[in-house]
Image: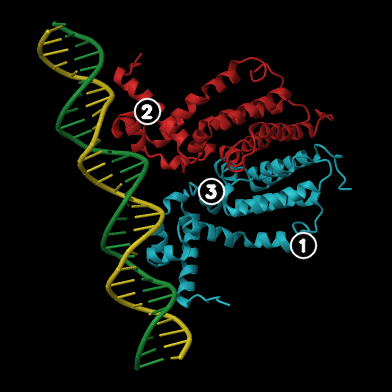
Chain colours: A cyan, B red, C yellow, D green
Amino acid sequence: MTERRPRKDAARNRAAVLAAADTLFTECESPEDVTMADIATAAGVGKGTLFRAFGDRTGLIRALYATRLEPVRNAVEEGPEPLGPDTPPLQRVPALLDALLCFKLDNRHLALALEATGSDSPYQAEHYERWHSLLRSALEQIPGLTNSDFTAHALLATVRADLVEHLAGRKGVPREDIRKQLASFIAEVLGGTGPDEAPR
Amino acid sequence: MTERRPRKDAARNRAAVLAAADTLFTECESPEDVTMADIATAAGVGKGTLFRAFGDRTGLIRALYATRLEPVRNAVEEGPEPLGPDTPPLQRVPALLDALLCFKLDNRHLALALEATGSDSPYQAEHYERWHSLLRSALEQIPGLTNSDFTAHALLATVRADLVEHLAGRKGVPREDIRKQLASFIAEVLGGTGPDEAPR
DNA sequence: GTACGATACGGACCACCGGTCCGTTTCAAT
DNA sequence: ATTGAAACGGACCGGTGGTCCGTATCGTAC
C-alpha cells in the first residue's frame, strides 16, 4: 500500500502549528485578528510550511476543530449509554445536543473561527451533514414526530457557535443555565406530538 | 435644530450606490466577490464617495438591509392583523417568523452579505435585539410557556440567512415547503405545553 | 450674475492579508 | 557517505478595505 509515512520534522511542525493556532485563537478576541503569519511565527515555522501542511486557512481551522471534536465523535459513534448508538432516541436526542452545546461552550473561540471563515458557511462543512443525518434518524424513530429533517436543522441551529457565544460570552449567562434552557426547549419540541413522557 | 440637509449631489450619489450595490449583490454568487471598488464603479462614483457616505463595508450593507426590511418592520409595528401588535400571540408568533422567513427568501443575497461581514455576527446588530425582544414578549403572553427568552433565540435561529440559503438554494427545497415545515415546527414548539392544539 | 465658503468628489495611494514560489536545508534509505 | 526526495522559510505577489487631499460642485449672500 502506498501509505507514505510523513517525515519526522513534518509531523513535529504540524503539531507545533496546531498548538500555536489553538492558543492564539483562545487568547485573541476575534478570530480574524489572528493572521496566518502570526500563527507561523508563534509556531516557529515559515508561512510556506504552514500552507504546505494545511492547504489554506480554512484547512488549518478545520483540522484543529476536527482534532478537538474527536472525543465527542467517538463517544457518539461507539460510546456508552447517554450518547452511544444504543440509547433510545427520546433520551439520545437531548444528550447529543447537550454534548454539542458543551463542546461549543468549551471551544468557543475555535467554533467561532470555523464559522467565521467567511465563504464557508457551517452548512458546507462535512461535519454538518453528519450531525444532521444522525439527529434526523434519531428523530425519525420517535413516534408521532413528523418533519424530522427540518426539526434536525432547527435543533442544530440552536447550538450554533455565535448564538452560544452571544449568550455565554456577551450576556454572561452561566453555563448550567444555558444547558437547562436548551434541555427544556428540546423537551417542548419532543413532547409536542407524542404522549408527554414515557419512552414506551 | 442642526438638521443639516444633505447636498443634492450627495443624496443622488447615495441612492445610486445603494441601487448599484443591490443589483450587484443580487447578481453575484457569493457576497464577498463584490468589492467596494466594483460597487463604486457600477454606481459611477469614486470609492471615496462611497466610504464617505457609509463609513465602511458593513455600514453600506446595513443601510441596504435596513431599507429593504422597512416594509416588514412597519407591518409589524403598526400593521393590520396577521403581523400587527393587536394580534393574539398564538397567531402572531408564527406570522412573525413566517414574515421573516419570506424576507430572507426574497433577499437571500442581502441577508447573506450582512451575516458574512465577518466580525459582525448577527447577534451584534441592533436588529436582532429588536426582533428578539418582540418575539420574547409575544411568547410570554402564551399561557403555559416557560423559557421565553431562550425559545425566542431558538426560533430566530431557525430562520437564519445561511440556513435558509442552504435549504432553498443548495438543496433546492421549494419555498412553500420550507414555509410549511417552519410553521409545523413552530406549532410543535407552541403546542408542547398547552392543551393539545393540534391544528390538523 | 458673481463671489466665496462649505461640502462633496474621485482616484491615487497605503497597509495588510492570504497565498505562492523557489533556492536552500534536512531527512532517511541505501 | 551519498543522494534524491521531501520539507523548509521568507521574499514576493495580487488584491482588498480604507484613507487622503487637491479639485470640482453646490448653494448662499450680495
Q: What's under tag 3, amino acid-wise?
A: Glu
Residues under numbered marks 1 and 3 in contact, where contact means CB atoms less than 8 Å apart: no
Residue picked out by circle 1: A80
Query: Is A68 left, or right, of A75 in this rendering?
Result: left
Circle 2 SS class:
helix
Residue B6 rendering spot, x and y as whole percentages: 32, 18
Mark 2 and mark 1 on one chain: no
Distance between mark 3 and mark 2 Cα atoms: 29 Å
- Is residue A149 shown to the viewer in this render? yes
Residue A45 rendering spot, x and y as whole percentages: 39, 67
Residue A57 rendering spot, x and y as whole percentages: 46, 56
Residue occupying the far right of the picture? A200
Distance between mark 1 and mark 3 Cα atoms: 30 Å
Pointer 2 chain? B
Callout 3 crowding tier (Cα within 10 Å): few <14, some 14–19, many ≥20: many
Mark 1 and mark 3 on one chain: yes
Callout 1 crowding tier (Cα within 10 Å): few <14, some 14–19, many ≥20: few
Residue picked out by circle 3: A115
- Give the number of the disc on residue B17: 2
- Is residue A181 shown to the viewer in this render? no
Q: Residue at x 69, y 51 (%)?
A: A133
Q: Quadrant location of residue A85?
A: bottom right
Please name which of the two marks, 3 or 2, marks the residue nearer to the observer: 2
